[in-house]
């Protein structure tokens, strides 16, 4: 094992796949000459050249459309959005072209493309740069949606995403790019659609994904001090969702708390709660509780950011509620 940053794990995944397959290329704003807005692509221009690490104008709709066409014609683009908030400018190409093309063409045109970039809140960035669109994209058939929580998963999942023949939305966090973690040496892939039990427990299941897992771990540590054993599941992929992993855990713990950064209406947590009550109702000793961001645009004011987002304190309170403590 080696210890590297989240951004370095992403860079390794892209570079390894570009060395393995000459059809893979990276395109986006500031990915080349500037080495990436968050330095994810640092050094890649020097290795692969301007035809495979492509700087674009600030024109998400344009370079996304070009990339979808390239994927339909046999290339395997990685499209970097500086933030997924900016992907809304290109959402017509993502939803109406990339996600539907295989179906509309009767299987003649697969679209092997990865759309990746930062999602969710990253501090005082204001309402237009702080949205978690995970559940939006997960609502769309034809897309796969991946939200890794640590460097090892980021690398293994991104390599799988690049090799996948379907369009993949790959969501990161600006606040995680500097996080360090152990990453295996050599070649490895993590399959899309498989959750992982990060901590085993007996009293309650806590399900989450992405950077909010860090708050879940804090909560689990505090709960352990009170002799409450929490099983923590990292979904890693939210389309497809590994419902079986969640249901099997709930059958053991009999309680469930789901934590995510997105707004509460039509969220991933809503979907999980539905499937658990449908398939494991008789095992539940308490109603499923969800923790989401407040149902408001995120404020710029620092005093209003933390109260609007999921945090360890809210998770601890929810766990005690489902345990009737």
Image (cartoon, grey):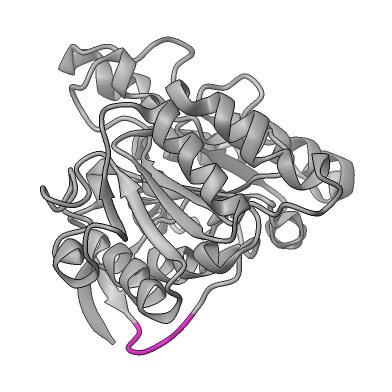
Q: Nearer the viewer, residue 20 or 206?
A: 20
Residue drawn at x 74%, y 54% as measured from the top left: 243
* Residue span colored magenta: 184-188
In the rendered image, residue 38, in percent from the top left (x then y), is placed at 18, 47
Residue drawn at x 41%, y 74% as measured from the top left: 17
Q: Is residue 201 visible?
A: no
Q: Nearer the viewer, residue 271 or 164?
A: 164
In the rendered image, residue 20, in percent from the top left (x then y), is placed at 42, 81
Which quarter of the rendering shows the C terminus?
top right
Q: Residue furthest left?
A: 34
Q: Residue 50 lies in what quarter of the image?
A: bottom left
Residue 187 falls inside the magenta stretch: yes
Q: Nearer the viewer, residue 279 or 225?
A: 279
Residue 195 falls inside the magenta stretch: no
**Secondary structure mostly taken by the magenta-highlighted segment of the chain:** loop
Q: Is residue 249 visible?
A: yes
Residue drawn at x 43%, y 48% as measured from the top left: 210
**Looking at the image, is 14 positioned above or below residue 310?**
below
**Looking at the image, is 14 positioned above or below residue 223?**
below
**Looking at the image, is 48 positioned above or below residue 61?**
below
Q: Nearer the viewer, residue 84 or 77?
A: 77
In the rendered image, residue 22, in percent from the top left (x then y), is placed at 42, 73
Q: Residue 82 lies in what quarter of the image?
A: top left
In the rendered image, residue 23, in percent from the top left (x then y), is placed at 47, 67
Residue drawn at x 31%, y 71% as measured from the top left: 15
**Looking at the image, is 322 positioned above or below residue 225?**
above
29 relative position to 142: left or right: left
- Tally of marks: 0
Which quarter of the rendering shows the N terminus?
bottom left
């Amino acid at each position: 094992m080696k210890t590297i940053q989240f951004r370095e794990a992403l860079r390794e995944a892209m570079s390894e796949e570009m060395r393995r397959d000459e059809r893979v290329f990276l395109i986006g704003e500031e990915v080349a000459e500037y080495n990436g807005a968050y330095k994810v692509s640092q050094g890649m221009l020097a290795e692969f050249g301007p035809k495979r690490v492509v700087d674009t104008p600030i024109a998400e709709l344009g370079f996304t459309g070009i990339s979808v066409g390239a994927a339909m014609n046999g290339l395997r683009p990685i499209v970097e959005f500086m933030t997924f908030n900016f992907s809304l400018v290109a959402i017509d190409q993502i939803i109406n072209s990339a996600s539907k093309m295989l179906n509309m063409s009767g299987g003649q045109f697969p679209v092997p493309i990865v759309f990746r970039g930062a999602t969710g809140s990253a501090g005082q960035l204001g309402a237009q740069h702080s949205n978690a669109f995970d559940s939006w994209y997960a609502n769309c058939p034809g897309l796969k949606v991946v939200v890794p929580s640590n460097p090892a998963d980021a690398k293994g999942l991104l390599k799988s995403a690049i090799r996948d023949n379907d369009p993949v939305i790959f969501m990161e966090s600006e606040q995680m790019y500097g996080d360090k973690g152990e990453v295996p040496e050599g070649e490895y892939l993590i399959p899309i659609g498989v959750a992982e039990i990060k901590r085993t427990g007996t009293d309650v299941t806590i399900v989450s994904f992405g950077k909010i897992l860090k708050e879940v771990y804090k909560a689990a540590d505090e709960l352990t001090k009170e002799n409450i054993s929490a099983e923590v599941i990292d979904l890693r992929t939210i389309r497809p969702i590994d419902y079986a992993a969640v249901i099997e855990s709930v059958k053991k713990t009999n309680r469930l708390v789901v934590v995510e950064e997105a707004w509460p209406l039509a969220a991933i947590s809503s979907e999980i709660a539905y499937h658990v009550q449908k398939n494991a109702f008789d095992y539940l000793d308490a109603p499923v509780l969800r923790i989401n961001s407040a149902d408001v645009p995120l404020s710029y004011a620092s005093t209003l950011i933390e109260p609007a987002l999921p945090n360890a304190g809210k998770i601890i309170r929810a766990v005690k509620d489902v345990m009737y403590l």
